[in-house]
Amino acid sequence: MTGSILIVDDDPVQRRLVEAALTKFGHTAIVTDGGEAGLDVLDGPNARDVSVVILDLVMPGLDGIGVLKAMRERAINIPVIVQTAQGGIETVVSAMRHGAFDFVVKPASPDRLQTAISNALKVEAVEDEMKRASRRRGGGHLTFKDMITRSPAMDRVIRLGQKAAASTIPILIEGESGVGKELVARAIQGSGDRRSKPFVTVNCGAIPDNLVESILFGHEKGSFTGATEKHTGKFVEANSGTLFLDEIGDLPLDVQVKLLRAVQEGEVDPVGGRSTVKVDIRLISATHRNLLQQVKDGKFREDLFYRLNVYPIFVPPLRDRRDDIPYLVRHFMEKVAPADPRRRLAGISASALAMLQAYDWPGNIRQLENAVFRASVLAEGDVLTEEEFPQIRAQVEGMVNLGAEPASAVAETVAEEIRQDEVADTTGIALSDGEAPARPQPRFGTLRALDERGNVRALADVELEMIKLAIDHYNGQMSEVARRLGIGRSTLYRKLKEYGIDPEAGRVDRLAS
């Protein structure tokens, strides 16, 4: 017996059509007329009954992307099927990046809708089983040996983390969303003297501003409207252990003052309390923001910044550690496998692995995990192919030759290793001295927005690279090149002359200066 399906759409006709289709297939529907009303259901007492959300993207007020963002902030992990009349690739990419499970274009046929719902329910059931299995397996302390990496880019992270584990100084972990900042924090805690003590996590960006102080520092009964019981707060909850403050850059300025006092003095002031409470914690903070810029903009206190930034650790994005992708893919596939012992995946094809390594992964490891998890659950065969990653393939197509032999012999070796399932320990892969898989070379090249130092490249450099790519891709057919670039032929020739490129032969070689 599955739960209800929440329909969020401002179009009454579309709501009735979808509700009728769901009823026909035996599902129970909860119908709402907009984004705010849909969130009210997900925040309310009936939230546990919702198994899938069917969400319209274009709505007045809070639109579909806004709902997806709010669900992520609230840690609501219900599968979302997005539907819209605007079916461009940009729309698909935006929805998927914000956590959508599937995408249907209006008017979706009842059969297409039912397929999407069945897949979503299937994934949710496997995910629930994985969570139950994880709880049954119980504890164990995560250490740096459990981190799945063979990338040189992570060597510095591990060295700094191991040194930090031997001290109690405040640590600031920086990096993009999804790179594994909490994993590093847990490895630090699991490698130090406090490994058997509490590890308490707080996502500062997901707490309403009016509740941040109460959640962090606690409150007394009756200290404000709705405070019917005493609450100790996360600082006291983490006493003798580690407190991990994720997205520290989202804390309101007035709360930052109290946080500074707590860090300096080792004591907190509960809301409505008459006395301070002493705490002994190891503080680890994390952010995807540039906190120094936040300080310059007046959004983050300078004194708190220097108090937290005693020992900074930067975790590189997945696009800078592509060598890790084959091993992460294997690990995520193994996590799914125990949920259905009757059907075990044999591995992943070398071409699919090359495709995953060519993609830039804006959502980093979290996005890769979701993509592999979804593909593993929904795959019809026993080997994952590029067909199981349609959204990734749509963006990578043209960059690598998916039908050709893999560009990297090592990547092929890793794919074969996955197929043979030679690794017995599936809980993690320790660092190895073995050869790391080489990055597959794109067939036409990938345009990069950042240079080697992480700065935005000059627009002229990116434009020049795009023109070269187009000329190479269309074999010097200048009319086609101009049409594809969206400029006139005369404009194209003018730009070629400015960049010193010989247009007569349709070549991309720079003329000698």
Image (cartoon, grey):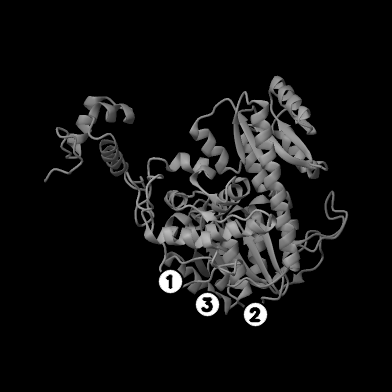
Q: Quadrant of the C terminus?
A: top left
Q: Label 3 crowding class (10 Å Cα cut-off): few <14, some 14-19, many 20+?
A: few
Q: Residue at x 48, y 54 (%)?
A: 293
Going 61% across and 28% down the picture, which residue do you hit?
58
User: Helix, strand or loop at disc 3?
Assistant: helix
Q: Which mark is residue 13?
A: none
Residue 370 % position (x, y) = 59, 50
Mark 2 nearby-residue class (10 Å; few <14, some 14–19, many ≥20): some
> Which is more toward the observer, 444 or 109?
109
Q: Which mark is residue 163?
A: 3
Q: Which mark is residue 434?
A: 1
Label 1 packing within 10 angstroms: few (<14), some (14-19), many (20+): few
Q: Say what amino acid the circle numbered 1 marks.
A: Gly
Which percent across, then down, holds residue 416? 47, 60
Vertical order, 504 against 383 (above or below): above
According to the picture, the residue beneath numbered tag 2 turns out to be 193
- First in residue order: circle 1 vs circle 3: 3
Q: Quadrant of residue 215?
A: bottom right
Mark toward the start of the polypeptide (2 vs 3): 3
Secondary structure, mark 2, is loop
Most foreground residue, 335 or 43: 335
